[in-house]
Amino acid sequence: MEVRKGSWTKEEDQLLRNYIEKHGEGRWHKVPFQAGLNRCRKSCRMRWLNYLKPNIKRGDFAEDEVDLMIRLRKLLGNRWSLIAGRLPGRTSNDVKNYWSARRRRNIDFSIMKNNKPPEITKTTVIRPRPRTFTKSLHYLSSKATTSKPIELGNSSSSTSPPIENGNEEWKTLLEEEDVLTNFWVEDMASMSSIDVNSTEQGFEMDLWHFLQEEARQ
DNA sequence: AACTGATCCAACCGCCTTAAG
DNA sequence: CCTTAAGGCGGTTGGATCAGT
């Protein structure tokens, strides 16, 4: 039997909501069957995370949210889920949609912020990194620096960023965005000698550890 | 009122990573 | 090791809505 596609009905939303309230998030492969939904697991997960989850914020982005988004985007590249993780109530889909909408309209954020024409510069994207490291990770196999999992945005680990203060912590860190970005790019360039975009070539310091190192100095 | 182009945003798709067998 | 299933992510699509003519 074909799974349903397209917009969700109120009934489907309610079924999913009921299921999550009863069983909690996760085990998405079981959700469609157990909730009585004729949807694929991904569709259920997407619907919950982007629409039904209780703390989701709707409406326009506030100025400080946009500001933070710009800084995080500059620092992290298109890591929408990470960026959204620092914007309470916003989903990665929201952030992604917001950003691409602005890009389509060809509005440069520097104009919004500074009333200056955009500078044409080469964008250096810091490549995505896995959220956790394992020994089997191919690019660590030759030069492992840590055997502990590193988790971005998880306060449970002693090596993870303190996120009790949420955005404030990051805002403070990002005050130094230019310094950080320049340092980071230079550091990456020196590590890989040519291609700063290549994760394979040993970019091993994650955001938090990098910031920790910075803080110590 | 009717048409059209622009914009928004929910949803889909394909790919990657990880864990388990 | 290899395979497979599941979770998760970013890019893209397309229908709905809005704004201008």
Image (cartoon, coloured by chain):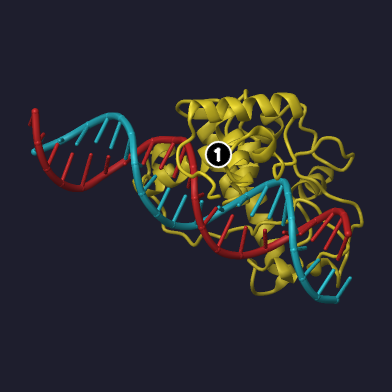
Chain colours: A yellow, B red, C cyan
Q: Nearer the viewer, residue A6 or B19?
A: A6
Which residue is at a point 71% across and 56% down the rendered structure image?
A129
Q: Position of residue A97 (x, y in %)?
A: 47, 42
Question: Nearest the camera: A153 or A69?
Answer: A153
Where residue B11 sits in the image (x, y, percent)?
49, 42
A191 shown above or below A55? below
- Horizontally, residue A68 falls left or right of residue B16, namely left
Number of on-image labels: 1
A210 above or below A62? below
Residue at horizontal 62%, vertical 23%? A54
Residue A89: name its quadrant.
top right
Is residue A88 visible to the viewer in this orientation of the structure?
no
Seen at 63% across and 55% down, the residue is A182
Q: Is residue A204 left or right of residue A78?
A: right
What kind of element bears circle 1?
helix
Residue at figure coordinates x 55%, y 39% from the top left: A69
Q: Residues within 10 Å of mark 1 (few under 14, many from 20)?
A: many
Quadrant assignment, res B17: bottom right
Chain to which mark 1 belongs: A
Report whether A132 appears left or right of A147: left
Residue in the foreground of this view, choosing between A202 and A184: A202
* Percent of width and height locating residue A188: 70, 64
Type of amino acid at the residue the image marks with label 1: Met
Furthest residue toward front: A1
Q: Which residue is mark 1?
A: A69
Residue A202 visible in the snapshot: yes
The image quadrant that residue A199 belongs to is bottom right
